[in-house]
């Protein structure tokens, strides 16, 4: 059976209709999900991009493979084997249309074809769905029915900056984004990134000044309403959704859909302007770590939803299981194939999750039994408290820190978090917490140093 893994980078689950979003921003993806197996609770064990994809392709957790930051200087463990390598060795024609191999060398391992998007600009995060499809569609059209393949497609459209084509810009927004009575975006002026993002620039291809560019192209001097920027994130998703149809169409026209598993994922989500984090993906809150995951086996017509908790490391194990390839014992993921076949395993894991970030913040989090404890290894520039405790069912926005009110529970979860980190270090032959050992990523450290010198500190 062929395999297509499609990643919709930076897409938080909460902004898709199939996960309950109230705006009709992803009708084609939602329609596909209606006939697929949708995992309601997929969470990232490490964010953002590089830890997530290393976990996805290795089937191992960040404590093991060692990639805990985006843009870090540490290499992946030398004994880590990646999904494309294993499938290639098993006779699969492995190919990717992705800019990941241009980020870190290990993302290039195992691909028989590393197909560049048709157009790559100054920033790989600004590759458009059209550029991905211009490379992917002809490749799919050339496939022969007896050529087993694994294709990875990586779409970046909802990643910052949110520059959807102009015809999409007002699709989910009406009114005046500079209305002085709408002030939700004004707190961003005190944000560490403000001078970077608000600085006017004529550079159409850079992150610098991207909010200023949005304002200029909206015909206003200054954006005051954060919902206008949210609407641009949604517009990017709508643009991406329109282009995903091309992949569905070519699979149908070529007959490949009759023998191809199609799986959709995201590496991490995005904060809109919750928690004082404006349009970015740092922080271990659910908008960042709760990601979409849904897949369809050939011939599946009836959709099903799975409430069991799943992780990114499950993806590699699942695809190896599907391909009939032995799973290395180092891969700690669990196969999702029983769920895809409509079965419910009796011995599935509980809902506890250990997750980390070390790119913009150096933190661990333990999510368990509806509670989440976030614990810092170092100060962050938002001046958040060193420990945060939230009860997700009653406080899905994670706005009420219960560390004081539930001090005993906070201490118990703190002890469990540290025990799980310590056990992982011992299990994987490490002596130092990689977050502590590596420190904040150079990318985050440069920003941190700049912020401390700025007018905000």
Image (tube, rainbow, N blue to C red):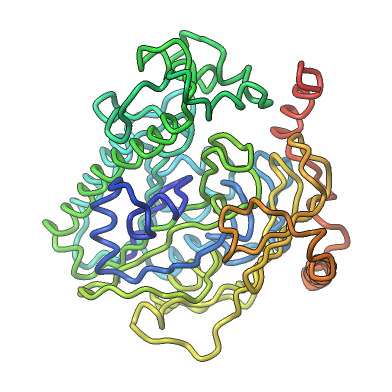
Residue 344 in sight in this render = yes
Residue 218 appears at what percent x and percent y?
A: 36, 17
Q: In the displayed structure, would residue 264 be above or below residue 75?
A: below
Q: In the displayed structure, would residue 374 be above or below residue 327?
A: above
Residue at the spot x=66%, y=26% of the render? Answer: 191
Q: Is residue 434 left or right of residue 198?
A: right
Residue closer to the observer: 185 or 266 = 185
**Residue farthest toward the left in the current orientation of the protein:** 253
Residue at the spot x=44%, y=16% of the render? Answer: 213
Residue closer to the observer: 11 or 139 = 11
Residue closer to the observer: 373 or 51 = 373
Residue 396 appears at what percent x and percent y?
A: 56, 58
**Residue farthest toward the right in the current orientation of the protein:** 431
Residue at the spot x=51%, y=49% of the render? Answer: 269
Q: The N terminus lies in which quarter of the figure? A: bottom left
Q: The C terminus lies in which quarter of the figure? A: top right
Residue 48 appears at what percent x and percent y?
A: 60, 47
Q: Is residue 32 left or right of residue 402?
A: left
**Residue farthest toward the bottom in the current orientation of the protein:** 346
Number of callouts: 0
Q: In the displayed structure, would residue 313 be above or below residue 250?
A: below
Residue closer to the observer: 411 or 329 = 411
Residue 24 appears at what percent x and percent y?
A: 28, 48
Residue at the spot x=23%, y=75% of the render? Answer: 302
Q: Quadrant of residue 255?
A: bottom left
Q: Quadrant of residue 319?
A: bottom left
Residue 93 in sight in this render = no
């Amino acid at each position: 059976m062929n395999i297509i893994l499609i990643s919709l980078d930076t897409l938080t689950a909460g902004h898709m209709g199939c996960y309950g979003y109230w705006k009709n921003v992803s009708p084609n993806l939602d329609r596909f999900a209606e006939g697929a197996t949708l995992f309601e609770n997929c969470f990232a064990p490490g964010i953002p991009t590089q830890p997530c994809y290393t976990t996805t392709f290795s089937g191992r957790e960040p404590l093991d493979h060692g990639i805990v930051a985006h843009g870090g200087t540490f290499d992946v463990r030398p004994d880590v084997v990646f999904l494309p390598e294993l499938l290639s060795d098993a006779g699969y024609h492995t190919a990717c249309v992705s800019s990941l191999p241009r980020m870190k060398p290990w993302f290039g391992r195992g691909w028989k074809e590393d197909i560049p998007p048709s157009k790559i600009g100054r920033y790989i995060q600004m590759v458009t769905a059209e550029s991905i499809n211009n490379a992917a569609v002809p490749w799919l059209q050339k496939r022969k029915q007896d050529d087993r393949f694994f294709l990875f497609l990586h779409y970046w459209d909802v990643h910052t900056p949110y520059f959807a084509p102009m015809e999409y810009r007002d699709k989910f927004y009406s009114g005046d984004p500079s209305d002085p009575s709408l002030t939700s975006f004004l707190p961003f002026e005190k944000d560490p990134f403000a001078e970077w993002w608000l600085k006017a620039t004529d550079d159409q291809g850079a992150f610098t000044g991207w909010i200023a560019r949005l304002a200029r192209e909206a015909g206003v001097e200054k954006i005051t309403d954060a919902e206008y920027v949210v609407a641009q994130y949604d517009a990017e998703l709508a643009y991406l959704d329109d282009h995903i149809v091309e992949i569905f169409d070519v699979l149908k026209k070529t007959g490949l859909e009759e023998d191809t598993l199609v799986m959709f994922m995201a590496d991490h989500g995005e904060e809109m302007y919750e928690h004082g984090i404006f349009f970015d993906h740092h922080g271990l809150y659910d908008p960042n770590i709760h990601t979409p995951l849904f897949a369809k086996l050939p011939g599946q017509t009836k959709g099903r939803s799975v409430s069991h908790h799943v992780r990114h490391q499950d993806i590699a194990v699942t695809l190896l299981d599907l391909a009939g390839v032995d799973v290395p014992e180092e891969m700690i993921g669990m196969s999702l194939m029983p769920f895809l076949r409509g079965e419910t395993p009796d011995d599935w894991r509980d809902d506890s999750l250990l997750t980390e970030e070390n790119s913009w913040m150096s933190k661990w989090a333990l999510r368990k039994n509806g509670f989440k404890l976030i614990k810092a290894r170092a100060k962050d520039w938002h001046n958040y408290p060193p420990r945060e405790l939230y009860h997700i069912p009653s406080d899905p926005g994670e706005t009420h820190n219960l560390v004081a009110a539930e001090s005993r529970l906070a201490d118990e979860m703190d002890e469990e978090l540290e025990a799980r980190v310590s056990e992982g270090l011992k299990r994987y032959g490490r002596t130092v917490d990689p977050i502590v050992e590596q420190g904040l990523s150079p990318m985050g450290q440069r920003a941190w140093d700049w912020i401390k010198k700025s007018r905000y500190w």
